Amino acid sequence: MKEFLNSSNVEILNQGNHSTYCRAGRLEVIDITLGSIGLLGRFTSWEVSSEPSSSDHRHILFTLESSVPVSLIRNPRGSY
């Protein structure tokens, strides 16, 4: 795995050591979030949700800041 990460310009974006996999009393951190090095500065949070996921794996939530401004343009004909 380390060889792949080193050769592909990809980083592990996980923060902390919260369990991402839960089954029959077994808690492990086996899910990872990968992203390019350019994304590192744009992540503002990364967390494992405590909400039920209907799976052995917990939801991973993160916030990624956008560098592209978003604007709403009004159509003079009344629709967007």
Image: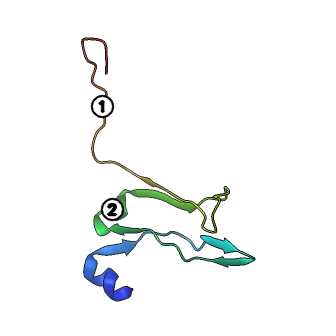
Crowding at dot 2, Cα within 10 Å, few <14 / some 14-19 / many 20+, comes out as some
> Which residue reaches farthest top?
77
Q: Kindly tell me whether residue 19 is visible in this rendering.
A: no
Amino acid type of the residue that numbered disc 1 sits on in the rendered structure: Ser
The label number, if any, that marks residue 39 in the structure image: 2
* Left or right side of 72 for 54: right
Identify which residue is drawn at 69% across, 74% down: 23
Q: Disc 2 and disc 1: Cα gap in Å?
A: 22 Å
Name the quadrant containing residue 47: bottom right
Q: As drawn, is 73 to the left or to the right of 60?
A: left
Find numbered disc 1 in the image and state the secondary structure of the residue it sits on. loop
Q: Secondary structure at mark 2?
A: helix
Q: Quadrant of residue 44?
A: bottom left
The image position of residue 46, as x and y in percent, is 50, 61
Could you tell whether 12 is left or right of 21 in the image? left
Q: Nearer the viewer, residue 80 or 10?
A: 80
Task: Say which residue label 1 marks.
Answer: 71
Residue found at the very far right of the displayed protein: 25
Residue at image location 31% in from the left, 17% down from the top: 79
Q: Nearer the viewer, residue 25 or 66?
A: 25
